[in-house]
Image (spheres, helix red, strand yellow):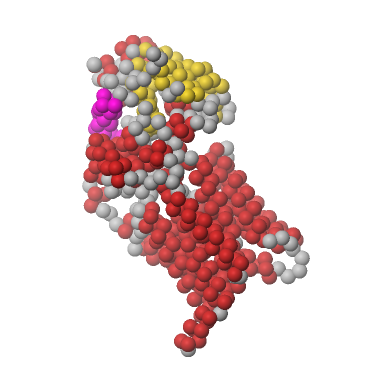
């Protein structure tokens, strides 16, 4: 039985004169946890946006959850894909609290003219408990720290009950303690729900140990891919980043 | 001053129309203002307001209904500004600034080309709430009803888009459609209020009550209600000042709304440091 949930063939994405993806092909099986690493500008974030239909293909084909992305079904597919971006700057006066922000994750699936019911608010509260910020539920979203904000973003994505989980540098711009807590949370979620997960990072130390396959991206291409043990080697990483890289001894995927 | 004379003024149709225009214009402008203020689109709103003004002057010059000209220009400018701001081909401030100055230039051009007395055109500059007609009120009432209905029907989508537009897009909400809907609502509201508030002043009535409400609450529902209350109070207080002090009504309304904004900012609870804000931020 074919359990491929993401199939990308020869994808090309360009932002005016800049080509962000140059013929990327990739297959992801159901329940896989994939790490994506590479230098800045390698096309990591663009790859994620191609999967959730926000990145516009110049050439190539993308099939997600059995359907070809064709420009008209992106919105309905996105309801089944959780997406967590980097910590963003938020206006501290924004008139929305943590609980309402997390509930936004439900809105796509709820559809127009349907309001969230009590059961859905209770689910939001449970997910907030799970990610460890239930005590902040009434706080304005703009008043959270980076780590707290990322927990709220993960909770929002979980509320969607996604089949695919896309994490774009979720630990960037937050302190080490918060990074560690977010990584633990991401692993807990994967063990609990077995969602197909693609995790982008440029910081090798923030690769979760649960990572099963690593994709190395460079210049808009999937440069190499394989097990973390085969990819996290000095000669491979030095070629990838174009500078001598010593493999940190505390990289989690190498310690499992 | 004779109190009996003060109250008798309400018997006149022109005053009843003005009070209704203040109520409806105050509601619609403030609701639209909440979207504009929360999304930080103030300059886009100013640009749409001036486009409506230019369109109305074109209508006056060519002899068709100025409201139709205002509607076409405001919707047209929203349709141009939206993609320009989104695609980032030029710095949005630069491109919107160019469209804004173009609209202002067109407004003065149409006014210059107009033959004869320009009283009606000047009225569109600063508005005249005391001369609005029953037809204007009906138009404003329909627009108020439609906008209020849309806000109730699509409250959750609007909240998601104005607070977290990229997130809204990522969870499958038709965020782009909602965004353009909000821009068009701004255009329609400006058109409907042009006659009573005036092209140069309308934008203050959109911005000031919503900006004042933004200082006072973290709840979108409360912000909408407070902004509406401030908008209506601004209109009615400005109207009263205009009648009592014999000053232009549009200017009185805008100055009142600016005073309310000043007071809201001075007494904003958001300026106070909360207990949890004093504590060191943990990750």
Q: Is residue A187 visible?
A: no
Q: Residue at x 40, y 31 (%)?
A: A80
Vertical placement of B266 versus B177: above or below? Answer: below
Expressed as whole percent of the image width and height from the top left, the position of residue B97 reads 59, 49
Expressed as whole percent of the image width and height from the top left, the position of residue A199 reads 36, 25
Q: Is residue A187 magenta?
A: yes
Task: Depth check: give the residue in front, A138 or A144.
Answer: A138
Expressed as whole percent of the image width and height from the top left, the position of residue A226 reads 37, 12
Q: Residue at x 23, y 52 (%)?
A: B275
The quarter holding residue B251 reads bottom right
The answer to whether residue A219 is left or right of residue A145 is right
Which quadrant would the C terminus of chain B be assigned to in this image? top left
Q: Is residue B75 magenta?
A: no
Magenta-highlighted residues: A172-193
Extreme-right residue of the structure: B115
Q: Residue at x 37, y 39 (%)?
A: A106
């Amino acid at each position: 039985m074919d359990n491929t949930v993401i199939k990308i063939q020869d994808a090309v994405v360009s932002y005016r004169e800049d080509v962000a993806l140059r013929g990327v092909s990739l297959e992801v099986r159901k329940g896989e946890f994939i790490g994506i690493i590479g230098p800045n500008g390698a096309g990591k974030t663009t790859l994620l946006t191609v999967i959730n239909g926000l990145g516009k293909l110049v050439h190539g084909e993308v099939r997600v959850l059995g359907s070809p992305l064709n420009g008209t079904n992106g919105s309905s597919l996105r309801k089944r894909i959780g997406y967590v971006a980097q910590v963003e700057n938020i206006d501290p006066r924004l008139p929305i609290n943590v609980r309402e922000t997390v509930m936004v994750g439900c809105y796509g699936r709820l559809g127009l003219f349907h309001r969230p019911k009590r059961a859905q608010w209770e689910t939001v509260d449970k997910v907030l408990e799970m990610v460890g910020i239930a005590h902040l539920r009434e706080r304005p979203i703009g008043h959270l720290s980076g780590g707290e904000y990322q927990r709220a973003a993960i909770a929002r994505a979980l509320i969607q009950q996604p089949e695919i989980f896309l994490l774009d540098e979720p630990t960037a711009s937050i302190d080490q303690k918060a990074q560690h807590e977010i990584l633990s949370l991401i692993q807990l979620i994967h063990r609990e729900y077995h969602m197909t997960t693609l995790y982008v990072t440029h910081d090798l130390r923030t690769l979760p140990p649960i990572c099963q396959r690593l994709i190395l991206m460079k210049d808009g291409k999937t440069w190499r891919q394989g097990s973390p043990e085969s990819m996290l080697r000095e000669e491979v990483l030095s070629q990838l980043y174009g500078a001598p890289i010593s493999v940190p001894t505390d990289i989690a995927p190498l310690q499992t | 001053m004779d109190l009996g004379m003060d109250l008798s003024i309400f018997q006149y149709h022109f005053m009843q129309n003005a009070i209704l225009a203040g109520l409806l214009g105050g509601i619609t402008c403030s609701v639209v203002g909440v979207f504009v203020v929360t999304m930080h689109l103030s300059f886009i709103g100013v640009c749409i307001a001036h486009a409506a003004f230019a369109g109305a002057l074109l209508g006056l010059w060519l002899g068709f209904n100025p409201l139709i000209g205002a509607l076409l220009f405001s919707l047209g400018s929203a349709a141009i500004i939206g993609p320009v701001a989104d695609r980032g081909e030029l710095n949005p401030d630069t491109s919107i600034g160019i469209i804004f100055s173009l609209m202002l230039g067109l407004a003065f051009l149409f006014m210059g080309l107009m033959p004869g007395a320009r009283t009606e055109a000047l009225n569109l500059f600063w508005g005249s709430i005391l001369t609005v007609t029953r037809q204007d009120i009906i138009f404003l009432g329909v627009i108020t009803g439609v906008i209020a209905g849309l806000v109730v029907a699509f409250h959750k989508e609007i909240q998601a888009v104005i607070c977290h537009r990229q997130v809204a897009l990522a969870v499958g909400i038709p965020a782009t459609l909602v965004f353009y809907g909000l821009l068009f609502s701004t255009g329609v509201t400006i058109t409907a209020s042009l006659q009573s508030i005036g092209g140069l002043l309308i934008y203050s009535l959109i911005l000031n009550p919503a900006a004042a409400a933004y200082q006072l609450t973290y709840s979108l529902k409360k912000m909408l209600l407070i902004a509406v209350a401030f908008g209506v109070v601004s209109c009615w207080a400005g109207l009263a000042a205009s009648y009592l002090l014999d000053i232009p009504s549009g200017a009185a309304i805008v100055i009142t709304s600016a005073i309310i904004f000043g007071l809201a900012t001075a007494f904003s609870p958001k300026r106070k440091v909360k207990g949890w804000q004093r504590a060191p931020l943990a990750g």
